[in-house]
Image (tube, grey):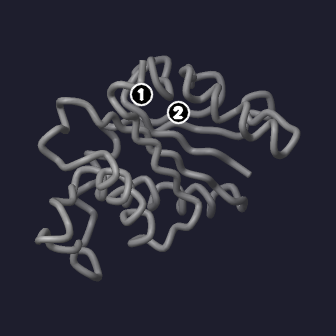
Amino acid sequence: MHFLFSGEGATDLGVCADGAATCDGAQYHHGPMTMVVDRMVEARHHYSLLEAGCYGFVSRGALGDRKSELTPAKKAIRLPGKRRGKETRYFFNNARVLARIAKEREDQLEDDVVAIVFRDADTATAGRGPWAEKQQAALDGFAEEGFAQGVAMIAKPTLEA
């Protein structure tokens, strides 16, 4: 099993050492949230994904560069109304692109890939709906691409520190 991370910087899931858009192995400088994921995998499956070297990283910029490849969603994102607030395309599209990259990686590696998208739910995205809707939008993005191994890691601002 291979893990594919996409975060916002060195203080969450990490960055590529040389500023590259994507990287694997020693080029990837993992962040503290990567360590949390590693400990969870180790506790459940009795191996460290970081020690095994089965991980990669895709920058937020790389996802943005590939966003133009997306076709309109098969089913429209549910419209806001009385019972549903405004859902965000930002989280939805980030998850869709990461799911596509993860599927490509599965074909290359001939192995399962777990994709984890980390995004802040801070003031920069405050107008994009409540935290739960941001998380659901990312999960909907993975589902739209038919990718079941997607994880939406959306940090709550007050809990992030």
In the structure shown, which secondary structural element does the residue marked by tag 2 occupy?
strand
View extreme (front): residue: 82
**Image-quadrant location for residue 119:** top left
> Residue at position x 72%, y 59% from top?
111
Picture coordinates of residue 134, whole percent (x, y): 30, 51
Q: Is residue 102 left or right of residue 126?
A: right
> Residue at position x 71%, y 62% from top?
110
Q: Is residue 161 left or right of residue 106?
A: left
**Image-quadrant location for residue 155:** top left
Between 127 and 114, the one lying in front of the other is 127
Label 2 sits on residue: 23
Q: What distance separates the C-alpha of mark 1 from that of mark 2?
A: 7 Å
The label shown at residue 78 is none
Picture coordinates of residue 126, whole percent (x, y): 17, 38
Crowding at mark 1 (Cα within 10 Å: few <14, some 14-19, many 20+): some
Picture coordinates of residue 131, whole percent (x, y): 31, 45
Between 126 and 144, the one lying in front of the other is 126
In the structure shown, which secondary structural element does the residue marked by tag 1 occupy?
loop
Number of disc labels: 2
Q: Marks 2 and 1: in contact by CB < 8 Å?
A: yes
Three-letter amino acid code at disc 2? Cys
View extreme (bottom): residue: 75
> Residue at position x 45%, y 44% from top?
117
> Residue at position x 81%, y 44% from top?
44
Q: Quadrant of the C terminus?
A: top left
Crowding at mark 2 (Cα within 10 Å: few <14, some 14-19, many 20+): many
The label shown at residue 20 is 1
Q: Is residue 17 above or below residue 94?
A: above
Q: Is residue 43 above or below residue 31?
A: below
Picture coordinates of residue 113, whole percent (x, y): 63, 55
Three-letter amino acid code at disc 1? Ala
